[in-house]
Amino acid sequence: MSAKVASEVSKKIELNNLDNPNSILNLLRSYGFSDTHISKIVKRFPRVLFANPEHNLLPRLKFIHSIGFSAPETPELFSYNPSLLSHSLEKRIIPFYEALKRVLDDDWKVRKCLRCFTWSMSSYDVKNIFPNVKVLRDEGVPQYAVFTLLSKRAYLAFMSPSMFVEYVNFIKGTGIMPFEAPFVEALLVITKLSKSTWESKLDIFERLGWSRDVTLLAFSKFPPLMCMSEKNITDTMKFLVDEMDLPLKDIARCPAILGLSLTKRIIPRWSVVKILKMKGLIKDDRSPFTVIIPSEKRFLQDFVIKFQESVPELLKLYREESRSLPEAQA
């Protein structure tokens, strides 16, 4: 590891004997761990250097291999989730694995969830997943959406069932039905927000011209809307309305546009469009959504490359505009 990282780690632990750490390094390297993998693990979980290689680490490595993780995948898993090395194999890791297996009934899906799993879950009861998933299924949430939840933030399925039901009912109260595609995404968003934060976000959009019903409609189409900062919401909304002349009702119909970077996407693309309109190369009545929403490849093809003969400097101007503006905070 770098001298800086080594210095940080040395403040947290004191090694009086190198025999055990060397045994650990040798074991990890025999399983394909690179110095980069090991550095990440030690930085985030320094006490791994005090573990018993044969009794603590080896059984975990063997178990992970036994459930289908390949040789290249195993180091990635442990370097991403070093706390796997601190949890009891019999009391935590295996029970959580078996619970996911029962719910998903697919080895590949279980491994995907484990790769993204947050293992700082000592306060979660593994048994909670069964009533919580039953709630989702009884409400009509499709199996693919259950997998989405578990692969993105599995710990939500292990929370207190009473709290889980409260979140589900709250989302239903916003108008999103459990069988609809945005439901699980809304659940991922809502569990990040306190009630006061939720109310403050509603107030922000109300000040900008949306009624609460309109904001809830926009939320139902694009749940991450409510995780945006006040500055990002305000700056983007004002630009769309004042500079691009977009009606508030149109933004509400396609709220995902608010989630796009103002400085790296919306402003540079709109600068290109203004040049093309000024030169009479595109019509004034073109919808801004046809400019901002398409992929980068599609935008370049339709608005830059297409007009290179007429405006040779367009690509350079677009790239300079994209680089010159500072990125806004999300």
Image (cartoon, rainbow, N blue to C red):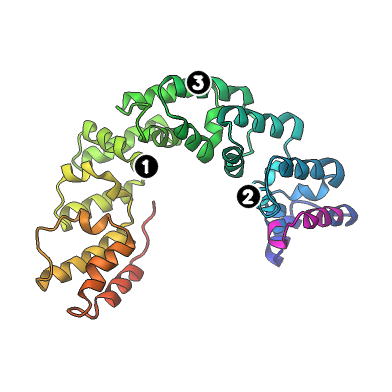
Q: Residue at x 51, y 24 (%)?
A: 133
| Disc 3 versus disc 2: nearer the observer | 3
Q: Residue 181's image quarter? A: top left
Mark 1 Cα within 10 Å, few/some/many (few <14, many 20+)? some
Q: Which residue is mark 2?
A: 80
Q: Tell me: 152 left or right of 267.
A: right
Q: Position of residue 247 (x, y in %)?
A: 14, 47
Q: Position of residue 40 (x, y in %)?
A: 67, 55
Residue 134 image label:
3
Q: Is residue 97 above or below residue 77?
A: above
Q: Residue at x 29, y 49 (%)?
A: 258
Q: Which sits earlier in the primary sequence, circle 1 or circle 2? A: 2
Q: Which residue is mark 1?
A: 224
Q: Position of residue 18 (x, y in %)?
A: 88, 57
Distance between the alpha carbons at the discs numbered 3 and 1:
25 Å
Whether residue 145 appears in magenta in the rendering, the answer is no
Q: Secondary structure at mark 3?
A: helix
* Residue interval drawn in magenta: 23-37
Distance between the alpha carbons at the discs numbered 1 and 2:
25 Å
Residue 53 at least partly seen:
yes
Q: Residue at x 27, y 36 (%)?
A: 203
Q: Residue 207's image quarter? A: top left
Q: Tell me: 147 left or right of 100.
A: left
Distance between the alpha carbons at the discs numbered 3 and 2:
30 Å
Total marks in image? 3
Mark 3 Cα within 10 Å, few/some/many (few <14, many 20+)? few
Mark 2 Cα within 10 Å, few/some/many (few <14, many 20+)? some
Q: Residue at x 36, y 70 (%)?
A: 323
Q: Is residue 298 above or below residue 252?
A: below
Q: Position of residue 185 (x, y in %)?
A: 41, 37
Q: Secondary structure at mark 2?
A: helix
What amino acid does circle 3 point to?
A: Lys
